[in-house]
Amino acid sequence: MITIRNLRKSYRNNHVLHGIDMDVKAGEFVVMLGLSGAGKSTLLRCMNGLNTPDSGTLHVGGIDLMQKHSRRELARHVAMVFQHHNLVQRLSVRKNVLTGRLGQVGTLASVLQWFRQSDVALADQCLERVGLAHKAHERTQALSGGQMQRVGIARALAQQPQVILADEPVASLDPKTARSVLQYLRDATRELGIAVVCNLHQVDYAREFGDRVVGLAQGRMVFNGAPDDLDEAALEAIYHAAPQAGGSAARSHDFEEAPATKGRWFAANTSSVAVSAGGAR
């Protein structure tokens, strides 16, 4: 579902990603951990086509993102779950979920937001998966934060994607609600065989929900293994890799990659929209 080889990305002289290698299988829930500025969001933006890598190999949902592609084509295969929902508050819950079908309909139907009965039925099924079928006709603005995030998951599922990318989807939620949201996301995608890459800051959530954990530090992958292998040494590599004196961005020789005995982690050298459809309301 996702294949990344030697991926590099820079912004002028700021080297953000340094030779990332990563694979994600169908139905696998991969959590990415790292400090702010470690490169997690940049890597996710490369995966959803918002950033263009400088070099490397990047295949997501069967699409070669290093080659020219259309946003509509990408939307058929890759869905996003955002930190701040990105829902239209005045629309009903069902209508917000139906926006996930826009990439699947013709241009005119997309502009006019006309949906088939099958799309409406799919939207209701997706709401059922996240426990919100009874809220389908309510205005989205009346929902709690956790419920809105579940609507965002239902919208992503309505795209029927091969891949879902989630950028800190529970950052603004309390722990109980956050666990509920992650549980819905993991269960639905595992059952449907959808590959997930989820950026998180909470180590305990990574251990609880991840099938695999990837740790980034200064744009390099420093951990890639099972949650059970996320020990103190791995956390030290992820969260305490220090830049060189002067605070400059890490260069390609600042870290020496060496496999550890547990999992596969690498020791860091710390010195160096209105809807028209029959029945859609």
Image: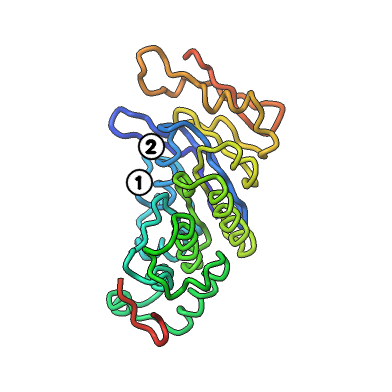
Q: Picture coordinates of residue 2 (x, y %)? A: 53, 51
Q: Residues within 10 Å of mark 1 (few under 14, many from 20)?
A: some
Q: In terms of image quadrants, where is residue 260? A: top right
Q: Is residue 259 above or below residue 153?
A: above
Residue at 47% from the left image edge and 14% from the top image edge:
272
Give the structural element (helix, strand or loop) at label 2: strand
Residue at 39% from the left image edge and 32% from the top image edge:
16
Query: Do the numbered discs 2 and 1 sit on residues whose CB atoms are within 8 Å?
Result: yes
- 32 sits to left or right of 27: left
Residue type, numbered disc 2: Lys
Q: Picture coordinates of residue 238 (x, y %)? A: 54, 28
Colour style of the rendered protein structure: rainbow
Q: Is residue 228 above or below residue 156?
A: above
Residue type, numbered disc 1: Asn
Q: In terms of image quadrants, where is residue 70? A: bottom left
Task: Choose between 192 and 173: the one closer to the eye.
Answer: 173
Q: Is residue 90 above or below residue 22?
A: below
Q: Is residue 23 visible?
A: no
Q: Picture coordinates of residue 246 (x, y %)? A: 35, 13
Residue at 45% from the left image edge and 47% from the top image edge:
167
Give the structural element (helix, strand or loop) at label 1: loop
Q: Residue furthest bottom?
A: 278
Q: Is residue 205 visible?
A: yes
Residue at 61% from the left image edge and 36% from the top image edge:
224
Tell me, for residue 148, which label it has, or none.
none
Task: Choose between 44 and 180: the one closer to the eye.
Answer: 180
2 or 1: tag closer to the N-terminus: 2
Which quadrant does the C terminus fall into? bottom left
Residue located beneath label 2 in the image: 9
Residue located beneath label 1 in the image: 51
Q: Residues within 10 Å of mark 2 (few under 14, many from 20)?
A: many
